Image (tube, grey):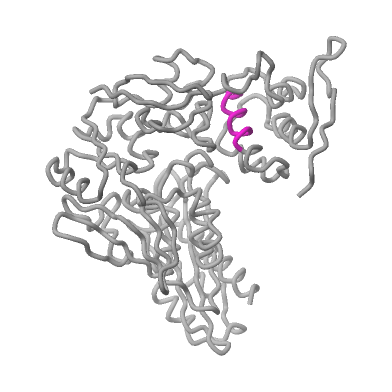
């Protein structure tokens, strides 16, 4: 059984037909070709399949694709703006928060959902928000540091051939 | 995943009719965090999947008279941060916040957590101590059932063919009530409870007028430690021996040994968790 669904993917309206027994992860990767989102454990433990649906981070492996009808989905491909990486992506690179990279798309999406809801999270809020994303390389500290620095308004980029903090954005304290 | 027929009812009545027609070959889809995984593993192979999320208005939390009414499709993440739930039913907010991971809590629903009837469901103990009831719709109309009698065995409830839980009704505790919930698992996130417990104490004139202790993952269904509750009731707050209450609660449970913990370990942890929960509440007074 197939069903046609309409939803927004990375801010663009989309109409697509897919089997009703497909997960959102299958639709994103296998039909739409957006392979930034990874399939890891495929049962909600590892978080590498994390995408944002209507502002919330969810496991795309545990959701039927038909469930995003009428909703707004953001994948890691939706983070960049005009060919520029998102500040979170730049911070991950600058801080060494990426090693093998397999968990990174999910980490970025959980981090984005956190910062969108809570622009200046504490370390413990970051740890909790990322608790559904496993990383076997970094030991998490670099990932938490990267998110914390974006929360604190630091902007990273390549300067003189080296990734470094190039700007400090003043964020209002609440 | 094995293909299935897919239905999007727009009312509870339509969903009940569909469920009645399709019979046990149909599965209800709420948050999907259990059903989708079971279908992928081939443990569940429904012929039809009925998506309840297309029914409007089943995910609201509201104060109605002396009760909090929680729509069955309320997501656990919403329950955990709801100001009303945190103020009136703190054990439920804590229990909801203990299930799975942030991503799972953004999908999973209260109705789904209960209808799976897992002995370790983290929202069940809080609802047991608050003596919640479930609003159930079927083809013959609606009925209300106490959560205390709803669970029959792992994966089994009193729901009969064609019945759907639509809301959870929780009486607001009296003003002098303190509640908490503690979960024990190997990891802080994403794990299944080895033991979980909710405790609710209500006081009147310095004495404990109502004590409720519920424990999960220690019997085929979540259960109340009724003898320990009765032992606490009537005592003055300052004289309640939390350690003795813990020892008594451990005598009331019937855990099994499995890969997450042995029977002996679980009993010991019932004692520890009950004592901890009681001590933390008594300190708050």
Q: Quadrant of the N terminus of chain B?
A: top left
**Side (left or right) of A56 relative to A15:** right
Q: At 52% across and 55% down in the image, what residue appears?
A: B183
**Side (left or right) of B160 relative to B183:** left
Exactly how many numbered labels are in the figure? 0
The picture places residue B28, in percent across and down from the top left corner, at: 27, 42
The residue nearer to you, when weighing B71 against B148, is B71
Q: At 25% across and 41% down in the image, what residue appears?
A: B9
Q: Quadrant of the C terminus of chain B?
A: bottom right
| Residue positioned most to the top | A161
The picture places residue A149, in percent across and down from the top left corner, at: 77, 33
In this rendering, is residue B265 above or below A5?
below
Can residue B251 be seen here? The reply is no
The residue nearer to you, when weighing B93 against A88, is A88
Q: At 65% across and 73% down in the image, what residue appears?
A: B283
User: Is-magenta flag for residue A53?
Assistant: no
The picture places residue A10, in percent across and down from the top left corner, at: 53, 23
In this rendering, is residue B131 above or below A50?
below
Q: In which quarter of the image is residue B230?
A: bottom left
The residue nearer to you, when weighing A87 against A61, is A87
In magenta, the rendered stretch is A103-113
The residue nearer to you, when weighing B41 against B12, is B12
**Side (left or right) of A102 relative to B62:** right
| Residue positioned most to the bottom | B205
| Residue positioned most to the front | A13
User: Is-magenta flag for residue A110?
Assistant: yes
What main secondary structure does the magenta stretch of the protein show? helix
């Amino acid at each position: 059984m197939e069903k046609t669904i309409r939803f927004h993917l990375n801010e663009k309206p989309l109409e697509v037909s897919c089997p009703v027994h497909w997960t959102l992860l299958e639709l994103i990767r296998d039909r739409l070709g957006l392979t930034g989102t990874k399939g890891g454990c495929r049962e909600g433990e590892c978080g590498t399949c994390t995408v944002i649906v209507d502002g919330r981070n969810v496991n795309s492996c545990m959701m039927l694709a038909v469930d995003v009808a009428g909703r707004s989905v953001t994948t890691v491909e939706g983070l960049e703006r005009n060919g520029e990486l998102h500040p979170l992506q730049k911070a991950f690179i600058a801080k060494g928060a990426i090693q093998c990279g397999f968990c990174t798309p999910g980490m970025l999406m959980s981090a984005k959902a956190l910062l969108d809801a809570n622009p200046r999270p504490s370390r413990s809020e970051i740890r909790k928000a990322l608790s559904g994303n496993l990383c076997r390389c970094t030991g998490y500290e670099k990932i938490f540091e990267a998110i914390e620095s974006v929360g604190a308004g630091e902007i990273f980029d390549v300067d003189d051939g080296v990734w470094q903090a190039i700007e400090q954005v003043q964020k209002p304290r609440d | 995943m094995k293909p299935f027929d897919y239905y999007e009812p727009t009312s509870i009545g339509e969903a009940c009719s569909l469920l009645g027609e399709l019979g046990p070959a149909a599965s209800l889809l709420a948050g999907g965090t259990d059903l989708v995984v079971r279908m992928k593993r081939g443990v569940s192979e429904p012929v039809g999947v009925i998506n309840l999320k297309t029914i409007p208005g089943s995910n609201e939390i509201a104060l109605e008279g002396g009760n909090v009414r929680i729509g069955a499709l309320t997501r656990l993440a919403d329950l955990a941060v709801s100001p009303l739930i945190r103020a009136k039913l703190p054990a439920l907010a804590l229990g909801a916040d203990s299930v799975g991971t942030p991503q799972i809590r953004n999908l999973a629903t209260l109705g789904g957590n209960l209808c799976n009837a897992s002995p370790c469901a983290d929202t069940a103990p809080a609802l047991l101590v608050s003596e919640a009831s479930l609003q159930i719709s079927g083809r013959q109309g609606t009925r209300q059932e106490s959560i205390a009698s709803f669970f029959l065995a792992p994966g089994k409830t009193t729901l009969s063919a064609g019945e759907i839980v639509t809301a959870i009704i929780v009486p607001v505790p009296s003003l002098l009530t303190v509640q908490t919930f503690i979960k024990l698992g190997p990891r802080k996130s994403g794990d299944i409870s080895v033991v979980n417990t909710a405790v609710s104490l209500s006081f009147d004139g310095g004495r404990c007028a109502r004590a409720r202790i519920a424990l999960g993952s220690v019997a085929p269904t979540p259960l109340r430690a009724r003898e320990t509750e009765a032992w606490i009731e009537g005592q003055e707050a300052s004289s309640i021996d939390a350690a003795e209450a813990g020892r008594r609660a451990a005598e009331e449970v019937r855990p099994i040994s499995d890969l997450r913990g042995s029977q002996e370990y679980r009993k010991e942890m019932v004692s520890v968790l009950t004592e901890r929960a009681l001590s933390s509440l008594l300190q708050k007074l």
